[in-house]
Image (cartoon, rainbow, N blue to C red):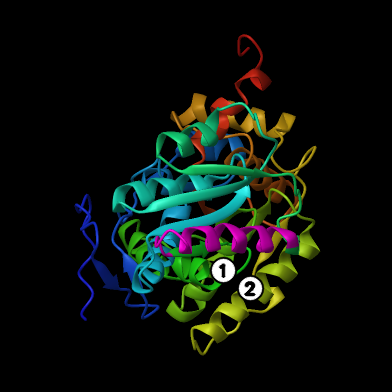
Amino acid sequence: MTPPEPQANMEPDMRATVVDALTGLDRVNLARLPTPIEAVPRLAGRIGVRRLWIKREDMSGYALGGNKLRQIDFIVAEALKKGAATLVATAGSQSNFCRSLAGAAARLGLGCHLHLRAKTGTKMVGNLLLDELFGATITFTDRTDPWDPAIAAELADIARRYEGRNTRPEIVQLTGVSASLGVAGWASAAPELAADFRTISETPDHMIVTSGSGLTLAGLALGFARSGLKTRLVGISAQQPADRLRQWIVETANQAASDLDWDCRLRSTDFDIVDSTIGPGYGLPSAQSLEMVRLAGRTEGLVLDPIYTGKGLAGLCNAVRSGVVDKSASVVFLHSGGAPGLFMHASAFGSHAA
C-alpha cells in the first residue's frame, strides 16, 4: 500500500489504516498530522537561547491532543488487525495515555476498560473525568508500581471476563506489551520533523523532550538515526534518575528495533538526559515547573502543565545554565500536551497568580 501524502486537517477515516513509510507498520489515521511548529522569540529571550521553536503536539487532535496520539495510531491499528472490540489498559489515575486511548476508543466505536492505580472513590477531575466522559469502564488497583507483575495478572483477569462476553479484548500497556509500537509511533515523526526543519530553514541544534516512560524519546532517537537527522535530543526526566531513564530508553529502543526488524541500534551516548527538575516526585508540581507554566503563558500564550511540560521547560533552563545546551543554540521544544494536568493542580498556583 502506498502511504498518502501528509495533509493538514485531514478528516480521519474511522476504520482505515495506512502504512507508515518509515516503519512499514499499519497505523489508524486518527491524529491530525502534521502538527505545527512555531517560533516563540519572547520565551527564547527569557530562557536564554538564540532561537526557540515549539512543536505543537498539543494540537494533534481528539481528546485534547498530546504526544500519545501518534503511539495510539500504531497500537490501535495492531489491535484492530487482531479483531479487538475492547481495549484494556492500566496506568495512574491521571494518565495522559489512558485519556487519549479512551478518546480513540470512543472515536472508533470500541470498548475501553481502564484499570487505574488509585483508590476507589478518587475525585473525578482532570484526566479521570475525561476517561469517564469518553465512556471508559474504570476499575482501580491499589498497586503503586507500574512494573508490578501483579498488575499484569489483574489485566489478564479483566481480559478473560471480556472474552466470556464475546467482546474480544486487547491488552495495551506502554511499559509492557505495547512498548515497541509506542516507540514506532514516534520514530514515524522523524520525516515530519525533517520537513519542519526545511520549512524553518534550519536544523535545530537540540530537541527537548519531557520524558516519563521514555518511549517518545526512544522513538525519536531511532527515527532520527534512520532519517539522518543531526539534531541532538535532550530528555528532561519527569520521573526517574538520569542513569535509570537512560538505560530504560536504550533497552526499550533496541528491543523495538529488534521486534520491528530495523537495522539501527541506540547507544547511551546518542542523547542527553537532565534529571534536575523532577522536584518532589512524579505527578507533583515543583516551584520551578509552576514558574515555567506562568512564563510560557505570559510570554507566548502557551498552555503548559506543571507535571510534564512545565518540568520540561524548567529542564531546558537548567540545561542552558549547565552548558548542556549552549546559549547560541537553536532549540525545538516538544509540547506534549497534558492540559488536564494544569487544571488538576490549579490550587498550586494560589488564589491569585502574582
**Cα gap from disc 1 to disc 2, whole angstroms:** 7 Å
Q: Which residue is mark 2?
A: 252
- Can you see residue 212? yes
Q: Tell me which amino acid carries mark 1.
A: Ala
Q: Which residue is mark 1?
A: 179
Where 308 falls versus 295 (above or below)? below
Asked if residue 283 lies left or right of residue 197, the reply is right
Which residue is at 80% across, 64% downward?
Answer: 243
Q: Position of residue 238 (x, y in %)?
A: 69, 48
* SS label for mark 1: helix
- Can you see residue 206? no
Asked if residue 134 lies left or right of residue 244, the reply is left
Is there a contact, CB below 8 Å, between mark 1 and mark 2? yes
Indicate the quadrant where residue 201 lies: bottom left
Q: Nearer the viewer, residue 24 or 47?
A: 24
Please state the extent of the stretch shown in magenta in the rendering. 150-168
Which residue is at 54% across, 63% downward?
Answer: 160
| Disc assigned to residue 202 | none
